[in-house]
Amino acid sequence: MDVFSDPANRDVYITGFLWILKLTLAGGAGALILGVLLAAMRVSPVPVLRGFGTAWVNIFRNTPLTLIIFFCYFGLFSTLGFSIADDIDLNNFWLGVVGLSVYTAAFVCEAIRSGINTVPPGQAEAARAIGMSFRQTLTMIVLPQAGRAVIAPLGSILIALCKNSTIVGTIGLMESSNAMKDLINANGNAVIAIFLVFAGTFAVVLIPTGYAFGWLAGRLAVKR
Amino acid sequence: MRITRLAATLGALTMALAVAACGGDDEGTGSGSTAKGIEGKAASGKLVIGVKADQPGLGLQSGSTYTGFDVEIGKIIAKGLGVPESGIEWKTTVSANREPYIQQGQVDLVVATYTINDERKKVVNFAGPYFIAGQDLLVPTDSTLTGPESLAGKRVCSVSGSTPAKRIQEEHKDAKLQQFDTYSKCVTALAGGQVDAVTTDDIILAGYAAQEQYAGKFKVVGKPFSEEPYGIGLKKDDTAGCNKINDILKAAATDGSYKKAWDDTLGKSGTPAPELDASKLSNCA
């Protein structure tokens, strides 16, 4: 463990996990917004929107995240010149957030759609009967109930997203997996210790997250 | 009831870890003495040699064959130890797994642009150096970059966790460092103009510059700003094997096989064969 007594090494470790945290938060926010929009599209009465939502989910849910992130750098940035920030790390970070959001949104969309299926059809019918539009029915009646039903699955998606964030290392962000490689390369004699600390940090952060979502789901579930 | 179960689980985990730790130690010290190090292993007619797989001119894998200067050096050593070429098993190593591979006995030797330094000497033994490289810059042919001091504000690419990347971070803080997991990605980014330079050891860069698809596009600046003695990594306690490899290298320098290895690989880029300085060979701690 004396690897981590060196402040330079501790810096590498902390920076790595700060990037993971930022990626998770930004990617999660992006994925939630996109995912809700996609779910709305998939249940909407407009065939074009339904088709778009279905296509998105099927394409991005079935493409390896590594490829998506790789494309964000070498496709969007390298080839198409789509640059988000001047600073190298920030640019890689935002390209990573785009990739993570696009990918995770597909899963969020499917979770929310399954939540919508738990809302009895009578609820929507009643809303339509009193003259609410599709948008009003969805945002005021269906989604609030669906949302409470999908807290636990959304928690799983968030946990997966947090771990998936390490893939942004492939385009050069010094997140935890690159930080770990950095430390291991310089301290070949402490591989197991370094690995345990990095893996342990994920466990320490994510196990309570899982319990928190479970607790929240229990609290907010619609009792029927 | 629940507490006992928890305690039992924790106990089992601790034991598993303890066993894992012991296993590591055993392999680190034990097998060296039983197998008499590299020479003992060579007596069986087989050797596992770790090389890089993505460095043109040094260690490059295409299909199941490896080519390059490091690979030729590996062949010379195997021959000197009495192992036929058919008895060599090549294994791809990346920068980060070289020490663990040696320690765990996954490879017997590592000839993979392996810079000798004090940190690494704590865990592995080094024979050689068989070549002394220097960190340099690869830039587009029309670039005005002249060396590390002109890097301020420029984007430089290197491999995350490597010695060259670390040097840029520590000694040239005003340069912007883009890190990838392979140099090929760096070279792609250089070709696309996302970075202004790629930095690592000069001969690695020369290997990339000499690749067909980039012919005439890149140049190596030619002002090395570090000294990277490439060594051959083997187990920490294998002093005899280390001395033996140094002898083989010395012999290779005099009988011309060292020069031939160079001419067949990196020599194709036009650089004349370096002199192998026998006085610089390590004393195999």
Image: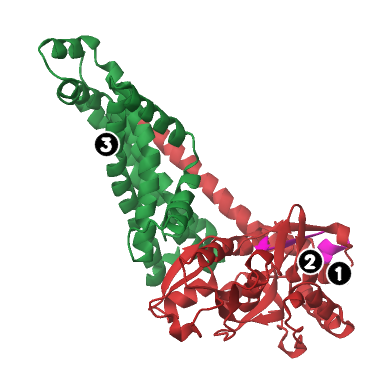
Chain colours: A green, B red
Q: Is residue B4 left or right of residue A170?
A: left
Residue that carries the numbered disc 1 in the rendered image: B81
Q: Is residue A182 left or right of residue B280?
A: left
The residue carrying pointer 3 sits among few (fewer than 14), some (14 to 19) or many (20 or more) residues within 10 Å by Cα, namely some
Q: Is residue B1 visible?
A: no
Residue at (68%, 79%) from the top-left corner? B285
Comparing labels 2 and 1, the label whose residue is closer to the camera:
1
Q: Chain of mark 2?
A: B
What secondary structure is found at the residue carrying circle 2?
A: helix
Q: Position of residue B261 (x, y in %)?
A: 81, 74
Q: Chain of mark 1?
A: B
The answer to whether A69 is drawn above or below residue B222 in the figure is: above
Quadrant of res B241: bottom right
Residue type for callout 2: Ile
Same chain shared by disc 3 and disc 2 = no
Residue at (34%, 33%) from the top-left corner? A108
Quadrant location, the N terminus of chain A: bottom left
Residue type for callout 3: Ala
Residue lying furthest bottom: B279
Residue A212, label in figure: 3
The residue lying toward the viewer, choosing from A14 and A153, is: A153
Q: Position of residue B140 (x, y in %)?
A: 54, 74
Residue that carries the numbered disc 2 in the rendered image: B38
What secondary structure is found at the residue carrying circle 1?
A: loop
The residue lying toward the viewer, choosing from A57 and A201, is: A57
Q: Chain of mark 3?
A: A
Quick check: is B50 in the magenta stretch? yes
The answer to whether B161 is drawn above or below residue A221 in the figure is: below
Q: CA distance from mark 2 to mark 1?
A: 9 Å
Q: Are marks 2 and 1 in contact (CB under 8 Å)?
A: yes
- Which span of residues is magenta-colored? B37-55
